[in-house]
Amino acid sequence: MSKFHFIKNQKVTLAIVAVILLAGLISFFVRGFNIDIDFSGGTEIKLNVGTEVTKEVCDSINGIIRDHELLGNDYVSSTTQSTSNSNMAIIRTGTAALSNEQIDALLDSLAEAYPAANLNDKEISMIAPTIGDSLTRTAIIAVAVAVVLMLIYIWIRFELKSGIAAVLCLSHDLFVMFAVYSIFQIPVNANIIAALLTILGYSINATIVVFDRIRENKAKAEAGTPFSEIVNAGAHETLARSVNTTLTTLFTIGMIYILGVDAIKNFALPLIIGIVAGLFSSIFMSGMIWNALDKLGKKKEQ
């Protein structure tokens, strides 16, 4: 890896980014997103079905809901294993809240299909679509404010070109996270806001470490030293630190994913992918983009 030149071999980086973009876009258009009740609105029923909630049980419950005469085909359902009880099914229907009559009819059908079900062990929640709209606005505002503040900070500490490079890297990392949500059909719920901000913070920290070293090397470099060589040296000098920091973080989140329940896994997986994407963008992309913007600026000055 010590002989790899990050700028001279930037075509490799661009090819990898192109594959990621293509895979993500295909998934967006073909699979879309599994919008959870937090955003879509609807009804969530937690019910003890009296048997372990396996994938087959989830599919069976989905079929009952889909074919139910009182529900029709306008309701989309998903069931998962509960976070605390393996017999507890989480049933979500959207995008409209069910009436009491529909809920009672659905529970009767589930009790008929699963005689061991305990209809007294249940929780029913109604969420209006307006709450989902509010969460969407909150997510957009939170990410936008974070990105703008980061851009201003990097602009002041380094220069505008490096700030633009950092924002582009952040956009890549967030795109990768959304692609993971789409490809693996992870429910898009309120947890996505925490995941977005966590990945933003982790990625920008890794990028600033690289930029700090590039700035130090630029100040010490001999006159006439190509900026591309300064960028390449900075990336190599911070590579070991970035990889070790990322691995340390991944060990912790990886254990959470392996040992955690479904709800935790759905939060940990995007973080794992986002952190790896942040390592890639900070080492391979940030300096490359900064160098490209630097060359573009010098051409305009000529």
Image: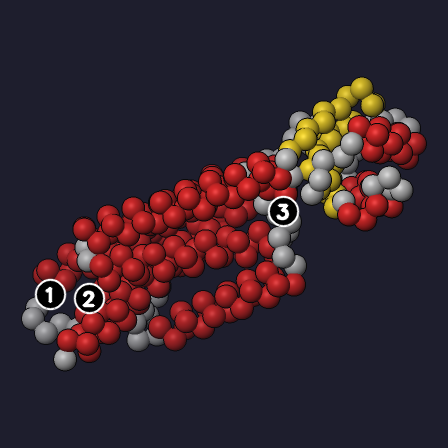
Whether residue 268 is visible here, answered yes or no, is no
> Hey, which residue is sitting farthest left in the picture?
223
Q: What kind of element bears circle 3?
A: loop
Q: Position of residue 211 (x, y in %)?
A: 24, 56
The residue closer to the viewer here, 46 or 222, is 46
Q: Quadrant of the N terminus?
A: bottom left
Label 2 crowding class (10 Å Cα cut-off): few <14, some 14-19, many 20+?
Answer: many
Q: Residue at x 29, y 60 (%)?
A: 164
The residue at which mark 3 appears reads as 35
Q: Which mark is residue 221?
A: 1
| Amino acid type, label 2 | Ile
The residue at which mark 2 appears reads as 230
In the image: residue 187, left or right of residue 50: left
Q: Residue at x 24, y 74 (%)?
A: 296
| Amino acid type, label 1 | Ala
Gap in angstroms between the C-alphas marked 1 and 3: 51 Å
Q: Position of residue 3 (x, y in %)?
A: 30, 70
| Amino acid type, label 3 | Ile
Mark sitting earlier along the chain (1/3): 3
Q: What kind of element bears circle 1?
A: loop
Q: Position of residue 194 (x, y in %)?
A: 47, 39
Label 1 crowding class (10 Å Cα cut-off): few <14, some 14-19, many 20+?
Answer: some
Label 3 crowding class (10 Å Cα cut-off): few <14, some 14-19, many 20+?
Answer: some
**Are the residues tagged 3 and 2 within 8 Å (C-beta)?**
no
The residue closer to the viewer here, 107 or 221, is 107
Q: Is residue 30 above or below residue 55?
A: below
